[in-house]
Amino acid sequence: MVRVIFQAKVHTSVDSGGWVEVPHLCLQHCVIEDFKAHPRWRRSISSLELDEILEQHTTRLFGEARRLDLNTVPEGVSVDVFGALAIVTINLMQCDTYH
């Protein structure tokens, strides 16, 4: 498992339910131990292309709108909601097309 984790405010609307904005993911969102433990992802942690790789995954999973609908969470993504705060975990191994 190679994880990227971020926190986001839960937004609500009458017609779409709950959603969160997906930030631009970078090294600070990565679980470094996961990356170091995986032979193919280990190289990425020190790569200048890491932000680009994460951006490709983000766009593919959430689209250009960069919103995660809490009612339709993609495979490889889990969401824990605590009131107005959501903790989103992306397992890059389950949604891996780069490596």
Image (cartoon, rainbow, N blue to C red):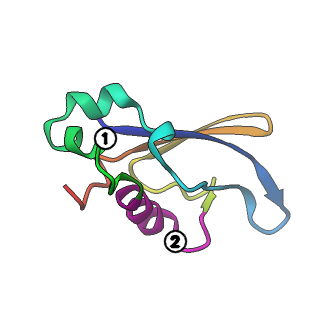
Relative to 65, say whether 27 is above or below: above
Which badge, 1 or 2, is on the more N-terminal residue?
A: 1
Residue for point 38% across, 61% down: 52
Relative to 56, say whether 40 is above or below: above
Residue bearing the label numbered 2: 63
Crowding at dot 2, Cα within 10 Å, few <14 / some 14-19 / many 20+, comes out as few
Give residue 16's quadrant in the image: bottom right
Give residue 99's quadrant in the image: bottom left
**In the rendered structure, which amino acid carries the disc numbered 1?**
Ile
Residue for point 32% across, 57% down: 49
Mark 1 touches mark 2? (CB < 8 Å): no
Magenta stretch: includes residue 57: yes
The stretch in magenta equals: 52-66
Give residue 72's quadrant in the image: bottom right
In the image, farthest residue toward the right: 14
Mark 1 or mark 2, whichever is nearer to me:
1
Q: Nearer the viewer, residue 98 or 12?
A: 98
Query: Mark on residue 45?
Result: 1
Residue 60 vs residue 8: left or right? Answer: left
Q: What secondary structure is found at the residue carrying circle 1?
A: helix
Q: Position of residue 51 (x, y in %)?
A: 42, 55
Q: Position of residue 30 (x, y in %)?
A: 43, 38
Q: Nearer the viewer, residue 14 or 94?
A: 94
Distance from disc 1 to disc 2, alpha carbons, whole Å, reads 24 Å
Q: Position of residue 98 (x, y in %)?
A: 23, 60
